[in-house]
Image: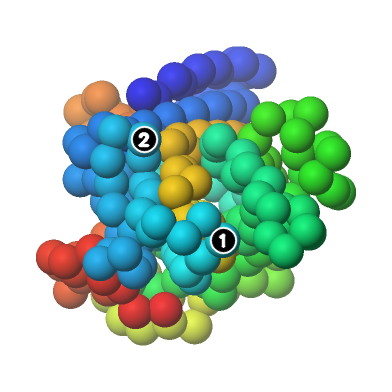
């Protein structure tokens, strides 16, 4: 399920340009009890031969209650920003449920393992940032039990220094005779004609985000649901296109540019295996 709110606060409109702030919040609910969630969200997990999907979610089925297996799950890459203007910052939230249950072993109470959640970002689905660890919202198991789930968040922000080379190129593009000077998708295509390996050297904006969840999953304790929240904003002056047809139906389409030679995500394979 995806819930979106698209808001435009117009500040000024003049003959040649429009200044606005655009804010959007997406929420994706991944129901792991539904087998359709696997292709819909591009889910890959390991070990696929031990952790199975059933009516309870993803489960490590084992008759021994205190056994566990190292587990990681990778989502698809979610596009954010707009097709004509990518974002430089995003607020991300991930919630996993249900909480694992305590078990007893030789007179000791064993808490279930908590998750470590990571995110990375890309401008083109080929060149990626490193993995960034998201912040656990809860300090201890008492806080987690009160919340009823595992919850994580992070603020991603591109440094101005990392954007400088891109801004220099974009400044050149805006002086050219083009259909729409504010179309950054078209600008990116032009930049790559000038410097084909540009995104190997710079990641100046966030076009896609992808999530990785890791834990030591306890036997017979399912992961049933993942909720992902993505919030971002863009703003500033943008020009009115010379040819209005290039703007038609672009307002609420997320970033869609992909590297020309990239056919599939390099971490996505036909099986449910992935390289780490």
Q: Residue at x 26, y 25 (%)?
A: 249
- Tell me which label, 1 or 2, sits earlier in the chain: 2
Report x, y in % for residue 168. 55, 68
In front of the other: 61 or 245: 61
Q: Residue at x 44, y 20 (%)?
A: 3
**Left or right: 260 in relation to 63:** left
- 65 vs 192: above or below: above
Is residue 117 visible in this depiction of the protein?
A: yes
Mark 1 lies on residue: 66
| SS at circle 1 | loop
| SS at circle 2 | loop
- Which class describes the residues within 10 Å of circle 2: few (<14), some (14-19), or many (20+)? some
Quadrant, the N terminus: top left
- Which class describes the residues within 10 Å of circle 1: few (<14), some (14-19), or many (20+)? some
In front of the other: 206 or 218: 218
In front of the other: 61 or 225: 61
Report x, y in % for residue 54. 27, 40
Q: Which color scheme does this rendered protein use?
A: rainbow
**Left or right: 191 in relation to 49:** right
Calculate the distance from the C-alpha at mark 1 to the C-alpha at mark 2: 19 Å
- 83 vs 243: above or below: below
Q: Residue at x 56, y 70 (%)?
A: 131
Report x, y in % for residue 128. 45, 71
Q: Residue at x 51, y 56 (%)?
A: 65
Is residue 169 visible in this depiction of the protein?
A: no
- 90 vs 273: above or below: above
**Left or right: 234 in relation to 271:** right
Quadrant, the C terminus: bottom left
The circle drawn on residue 56 is: 2
Q: Which corner quadrant of the image does residue 33 belong to?
A: top left
In front of the other: 86 or 55: 55
């Amino acid at each position: 399920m995806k819930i979106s709110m698209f808001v435009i606060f117009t500040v000024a409109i003049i003959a040649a340009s429009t200044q606005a702030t655009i804010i959007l919040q997406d929420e994706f609910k991944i129901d792991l009890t539904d087998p359709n969630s696997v292709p819909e969200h591009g889910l890959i997990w390991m070990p696929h031969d031990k952790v199975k999907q059933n009516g309870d979610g993803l489960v490590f089925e084992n008759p021994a209650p205190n056994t566990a297996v190292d587990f990681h799950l990778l989502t698809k890459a979610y596009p954010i920003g707009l097709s004509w203007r990518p974002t430089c910052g995003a607020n991300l939230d991930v919630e996993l449920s249900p909480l694992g249950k305590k078990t007893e072993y030789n007179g000791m109470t064993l808490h279930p393992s908590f998750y470590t959640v990571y995110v990375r970002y890309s401008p083109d689905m080929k060149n990626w940032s490193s993995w960034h660890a998201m912040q656990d919202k809860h300090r201890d198991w008492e806080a987690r039990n009160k919340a009823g789930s595992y919850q994580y968040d992070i603020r991603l922000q591109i440094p101005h220094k990392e954007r400088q080379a891109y801004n220099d190129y974009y400044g050149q593009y805006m002086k050219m005779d083009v259909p729409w000077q504010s179309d950054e998708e078209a600008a990116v295509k032009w930049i790559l004609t000038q410097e084909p390996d540009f995104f190997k050297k710079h990641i100046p904006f966030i076009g896609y985000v992808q999530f990785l969840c890791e834990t030591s999953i306890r036997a017979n304790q399912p992961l049933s649901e993942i909720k992902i929240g993505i919030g971002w904003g863009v703003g500033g002056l943008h020009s009115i296109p010379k040819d209005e047809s290039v703007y038609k139906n672009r307002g609420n389409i997320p970033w869609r540019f992909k590297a020309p030679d990239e056919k599939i995500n390099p971490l996505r394979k036909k099986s449910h295996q992935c390289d780490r």
